[in-house]
Image: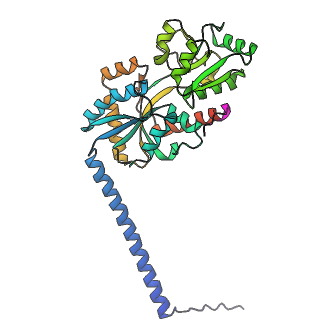
Amino acid sequence: MRVKILVFIRPSRKLWERRMKWGQMTRIRTILLALAGLWVLACGVASAQTYPSKVIRVIVPVTPGSPVDVVARLLAPELSRNLGQTVVVENRPGAGGTIGMKSVAQSEGDGHTLLLHSASFATAAAAYSNPGFDARKDFQPIARLGSSCWVLVIEPSVPAATLSEFIEYAKAHPGQLNFGFGLASGPHVLGEAFKAATDIQVNSIPYKGGAPAVTDMLGGRIHMNFGTPATLMPLIRDGKIRPIAVTSPERSPELPDIPTMVESGLPEMTATFWTAIFAPRGTNTIIVRQIEAAVQDALKNEELRAAMRRVGFEPTRDHRVNMDEFFALELEKWGRWSKIAGVEVN
């Protein structure tokens, strides 16, 4: 028969004392970490309770007078009224908007520096190899303000009235048509993705901005361009350029007779030109919710909504959209299009 012998070894006094001290230190460290967490939470709550404590700067990384800039200046007085603090708009254009975006990413996340941008945010994040920030990690999307679309327009001398006719003509005349665009812009990525999707050979002509490309289109040097209805409508009405398709899921109220990309057989080219407001990542959640509520209240103002429509943006109706999810999907889509189109700016 086997007999099991259990041997109990009593730890030495010194080992026992070391274990006691280690246990005490672990408990003390746990308590200190808990207290630190409570202190950070208390500071965050206190900061949120006193927000806003100074002037709020809304950085707009585009030139003054553009539709996005106009929306920012329409929104600023409403935010000021709702938040009880002065709100100023600062234009910081350049490098596809990345200069202004970088300045916000590097600012303190206290809710006093915000970014108001458009779908060009996702475009620049995808097109620039080193923009100086990480769009996913450095920004907190707060609220979408409104949306529009892009319209594909062609120079009137091109003998095409529809998208299919234009594609057919471009394929029959490879390398004879020119596509003009602002470098690393939404139209840039859209146009290159469109060329890849339709397998047409059209020369790509980059400009410092979209306006010079349109000017050259009027002179007959550019034959294809993407732009917003708000920007191009005067030229469309005068017959100086010809619209053949819009990128929105549904037809544009400004161009009800122009079919969508979906109707024209290219559903993969659907895109909206949205505008939204962002804060640096790490901004207190309570402050983010305050700003979101202030934006929602502002968008209830019918005069503001009417003014936004005049510059081509349909004000947001459904505020229940998960902005983190929406922004992540936009970054994924534009990143995919940029790779397909081979758009990369160093």
Residue located 37% across and 30% down the image? 72
In the rendered image, the vertical position of residue 236 relative to residue 77, given as above or below: above
Is 179 in front, or is 44? 179
Q: Is residue 223 left or right of residue 82?
A: right
Q: Which residues are magenta?
A: 339-345
Q: Position of residue 115 (x, y in %)?
A: 41, 38
Q: Is residue 122 left or right of residue 194?
A: left
In the rendered image, the vertical position of residue 285 relative to residue 22, given as above or below: above
Q: Position of residue 44 (x, y in %)?
A: 33, 53
Scheme by which the image is coloured: rainbow
- The picture quadrant where one finds residue 165 is top right
Residue located 67% across and 92% down the image? 3
Q: Position of residue 175 (x, y in %)?
A: 73, 19
Q: Can residue 259 be seen at all in this image of the molecule?
A: no
Q: Is residue 323 shown in magenta?
A: no
- The picture quadrant where one finds residue 178 is top right
Q: Can residue 187 be seen at all in this image of the molecule?
A: yes
Count of picture labels: 0
Q: Position of residue 307 (x, y in %)?
A: 35, 20
Residue located 75% across and 13% down the image? 172
Residue located 61% across and 17% down the image? 224
